[in-house]
Image (cartoon, rainbow, N blue to C red):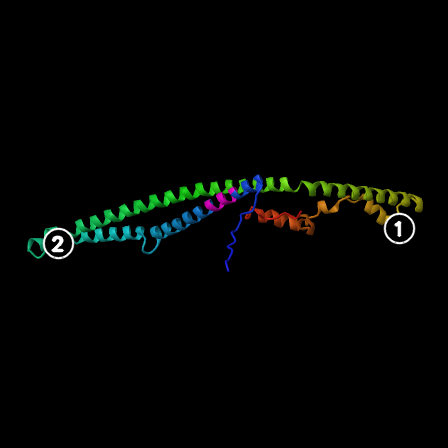
């Protein structure tokens, strides 16, 4: 009995979604590069300033050179009596160690500065890549949400007409059922409704968290990570 091997077929994408996929791939590549730069920069900082870092090594080498100079007379006397070799001059050894430590310090500083510059450039590129994704997400939603926009506009216009009719009826009944002056407690609810904003939700501080927007906000956020995320249409 033969076994059929099924191959995964990539989803067919619109040009807008393909552009979004490329923008996401670019963003992710820059983010990974920036993460590597930041890790290397952190390591570089540790190599510079840590207990075993090159700055401490330079300080130790400077101390050793000062000590060698302070003990130079002792070394000269030892050479004169044949107890030490001229080639074993501690000052020369300390100067060489200091020169090597300073060279490492200079190299590490240049490396740190290079990493910092690269990280700054990568951060700017990442910001730009994120803006490109925002543009691409907007294009996807624009290309696919046209029908829901038309449908919602039609529904909203019908509801708006119904609301306008209700307001007219309330206004008529207020004048037909009550004395218009002075204002009374009986007409207060009608008066407050007619004088309030027609669409109070639009002025509410909780507008962005309204349940009607939740599926759309979730879809918008999902598209920033997945070019094949579905819209609630």
Of helix, strand and loop, which one carries label 2?
helix
Give the residue at x 20% y 51%.
94
Label 2 Cα neighbours within 10 Å, binned few <14 / some 14-19 / many ≥20:
many
Report x, y in % for residue 179: 93, 45
* In the displayed structure image, the side of residue 53 where residue 233 appears, left or right: right
State the SS at label 1.
Answer: loop
At horizontal 11% and vertical 52% (from top left) the residue drawn is: 76
Residue 41 visible, this angle: yes
Q: Which mark is residue 186?
A: 1
Q: In the image, what residue occupies the spot 82% across and 42% down?
A: 164
Decide whether the magenta segment is chiefly helix, strand or loop. helix
Q: Return the residue at label 2.
A: 75
Residue 14 percent location from the top left of the image:
58, 41
Q: Residues within 10 Å of mark 1 (few under 14, many from 20)?
A: few
Give whichever of 72, 17 is nearer the camera.
17
Q: Nearer the viewer, residue 94 or 126?
A: 126
Q: Is residue 158 magenta?
A: no
Residue 181 visible within the image: no
Residue 38, given in percent of the width and then of the height, sits at 42, 49
Estimate the spatial distance between the alpha carbons at disc 2 and disc 1, rounded to whole Å: 110 Å
Q: Which residues are magenta?
A: 22-29
N-term-proximal mark, 2 vs 1: 2
């Amino acid at each position: 009995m033969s076994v059929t091997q099924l191959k995964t077929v990539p989803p067919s994408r619109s040009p807008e979604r393909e552009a979004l996929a490329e923008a996401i791939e670019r963003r992710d590549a820059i983010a990974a590069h920036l993460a590597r730069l930041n890790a290397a920069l952190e390591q570089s900082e540790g190599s510079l300033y840590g207990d075993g870092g090159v700055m401490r090594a330079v300080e130790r080498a400077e101390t050793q050179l000062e000590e060698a100079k302070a003990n130079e007379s002792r070394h000269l006397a030892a050479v004169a009596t044949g107890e030490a070799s001229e080639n074993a001059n501690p000052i020369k050894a300390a100067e060489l160690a200091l020169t090597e430590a300073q060279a490492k310090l200079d190299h590490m500083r240049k490396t740190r500065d290079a990493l910092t510059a690269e990280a700054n450039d990568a951060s700017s590129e990442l910001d730009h890549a994120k803006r490109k994704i925002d543009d691409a997400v907007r294009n996807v939603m624009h290309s696919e949400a046209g029908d829901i926009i038309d449908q919602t506009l039609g529904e909203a216009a019908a509801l708006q007409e119904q609301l306008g009719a209700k307001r007219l009826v309330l206004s008529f009944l207020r004048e037909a059922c009550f004395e218009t002056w002075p204002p009374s407690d009986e007409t207060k609810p009608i008066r407050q409704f007619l004088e309030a904003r027609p669409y109070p939700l639009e002025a509410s501080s909780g507008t962005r968290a309204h349940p009607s927007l939740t599926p759309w906000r979730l879809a918008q956020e999902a598209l920033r990570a997945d070019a094949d995320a579905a819209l609630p249409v």
